[in-house]
Image: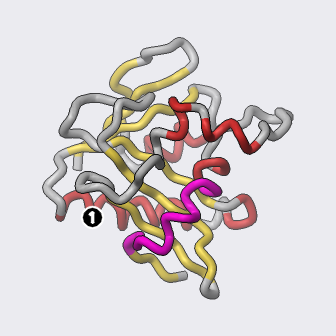
Amino acid sequence: MELREINKADYRLLEDFLYHAIFLPKGAALPPREIIYQPEIYIYIKNFGGKYDCGVVAESDGNIVAMAWTRIIAGYGHIDNNTPELAISVLPDYRGNGIGTKLMEYLFELLRKCGYKQTSLSVKKANLAVKFYKRLGYKIHDCPKQEDYLMIKEL
């Protein structure tokens, strides 16, 4: 497994990884792929590659199997204009193998080098990833909606 910073050639894969980042409750049917084009979702990747965008990928045998990226956007996990919001996606066949943890640790290192003090995210309370984020040091900051947590990690 190789971890590296995202590059321009990888941007074409962001739509796939954004789709795989959508939380599905147990037993729920996959939503249509077009769901990612809703403005409140597509903002996470639209015109990615700007000054405040950071990202890392995990590659296995020449294939990208996971991506984590941050942007300063008015998304679900927006705190302020100095805090990048996180999105992470690991392809289903690669989940549960520690790839997400390694990817996140690498992203945190990159964010520190870029001078960021914290990062935020929004996650459904029912999502098992809440435990993952807590293990990585994220703390619940607020519950803007009854079904979501707003979480912050100090870097």
Residue 144 appears at what percent x and percent y?
43, 15
The residue that label 1 is drawn on is: 109
7 within the magenta span: yes
Of 76 and 154, nearer the camera is: 76
Amino acid type for the residue under numbered disc 1: Glu
Residue 154 appears at what percent x and percent y?
24, 43
Residue 82 appears at what percent x and percent y?
18, 39
Whether residue 95 sits left or right of residue 147 in the image: it is: right
Q: Which residue is found at the position 42% from the left and 66% from the top?
A: 56
Q: Residue furthest left?
A: 115
Q: Residue furthest top?
A: 146
Relative to 25, is 21 above or below?
below
Q: Which residue is found at the position 20% from the left and 59% from the top?
A: 112
> Magenta region: which residues?
5-17
Q: Secondary structure at mark 1?
A: helix
Q: Which residue is found at the position 45% from the left and 65% from the top?
A: 103
Of 45 and 86, nearer the camera is: 45
Of 125 and 74, nearer the camera is: 74
In the rendered image, the quadrant that contains the N terminus is bottom right
Q: Which residue is found at the position 67% from the left and 61% from the top?
A: 91
Q: In the rendered picture of this protein, how many numbered marks are placed on residues?
A: 1
Tell me if residue 45 can be seen: yes
| Dominant secondary structure, magenta | helix
44 within the magenta span: no
Whether residue 26 sits left or right of residue 75 in the image: it is: right
Residue 46 appears at what percent x and percent y?
46, 47
Tell me if residue 153 can be seen: no
